[in-house]
Image: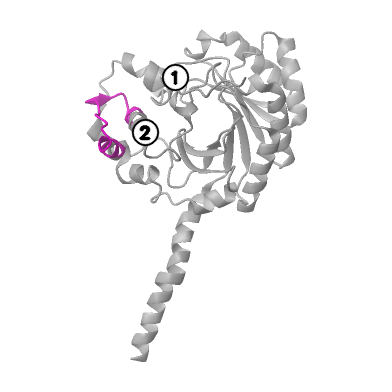
Amino acid sequence: MRARGQAAIMEDVKRDGNGGAEEQKERSMSAASLTGIHFLLTYRCSAACDHCFVWGSPEQSGVMSADDIDAYLIGASDLGTITSAAIEGGEPFVYYDELLAAVEVCHRHGLPVDVLSNCFWARSEQDAENALVPLVRAGLTKLLTSTDVFHTVYVPSERVDTAIAVAERLGIGTGKMVSRIESVMFRGRAAHALAPKDTREGVAWQECPTCPKEALASPRRVHLDRHGNLHACQGISIGNAASQSIADVARAYDPEAHPIVGALLRGGPTQLARMAMEDGFSPEERYVDACHLCYESRRALRPRHPRELGPDEMYGIAPPQPV
């Protein structure tokens, strides 16, 4: 009788006490995996590339402040896991003063800082030097560049070559990111501009049982936009760092309980499509890839899950321009 009572007590402890701890441990495993924050400084861009999955364009507006970034990094410091920062867009160089301040803040927090750019500003070596020298002094670690058939519609590839040459002369790392049609993820503008023209056989909507691109259960990096949204995948928010700290968001993140992430973990984009069908979504017979199906399903689900599926910019809706 005593042993059985002790067993019952232990079962209660396991369920009510340790069980909760175990659940928290499972959730915090995703927090422990988080090592990088990619700041989407702005959705505004000098270009509007067809393959852009954040819908960057000159029509977008607004920028994240250095004070915001400082607060976000302070809020993330409790995790003790963040080891790198990146600043992206949109195109971060369209808000140069804010970009410079953002690099300074990240450097002050002891983080190596990468910046991703299409290099529209590198019209000459002198222009590139004028842009990069202050950033290097502020703590810029690496210049990542984007150039491909989509970008060169707006920015000549020679400007990228110029920026890389000057960056290497200044002693910082460089990297060139090239998107080819076979590697495009058909979400964002790509789902709108490129998918209708794609002639590949693609996949049936019933044939996408997993997410092939993102580690949604334990993300190693998140994208943080100017609204404070923390994106596990662009357009899927797991919390908002403007209303609670990154550490709190990460520790509370329960992938299985998240209405979008949980569905993707259980049945991939196919499961999202089934959810969207409850709201009147009629899937096409075939999609270019799993990302394409996922994105179109998410668009249909936004009215039901506005907090998790946003912001508008990620779905091709530009906010009103400031007066």
| Numbered disc 1: secondary structure | loop
Span of residues in magenta: 272-294
Any part of residue 279 in sight: yes
Q: CA distance from mark 2 to mark 1?
A: 18 Å
Q: Quadrant of residue 35?
A: top right
What crowding class fits label 1: few (fewer than 14 Cα within 10 Å), some (14-19), or many (20 or more)?
A: many
Amino acid at circle 2: Arg
Label 2 crowd (10 A; few <14 / some 14-19 / many >=20):
many
Height in image: 264 above or below 128? below
Which sits in the foreground, 252 or 62?
62
The residue identified by callout 2 is 298
Where residue 57 sits in the image (x, y, percent)?
53, 18
Give the residue displayed 39% in from the left and 34% down from the top.
Answer: 302
The reply to whether the C-beta atoms of the residues labelled 2 and 1 are less than 8 Å apart is no
Q: Is residue 310 left or right of residue 72?
A: left
Q: Nearer the viewer, residue 107 or 189?
A: 189
Q: Secondary structure at mark 2?
A: helix
What residue did someone put label 1 on? 51
Q: Nearer the viewer, residue 180 or 276?
A: 276
Would you say residue 32 is visible in this rendering?
no
Tell me what residue is drawn at x 66 percent, y 38 percent: 68
Which callout, 2 or 1, points at the residue further toward the start of the chain?
Answer: 1
Give the colouring mode of the picture.
Answer: one colour
In the rendered image, residue 285 lying in the magenta stretch gets the answer yes
Rendered view: 131 above or below 40: above
- The amino acid at mark 1 is His
Q: Residue 199 location in percent, x, y?
A: 28, 15
Residue under the image location 36 percent in, 39 percent down:
304
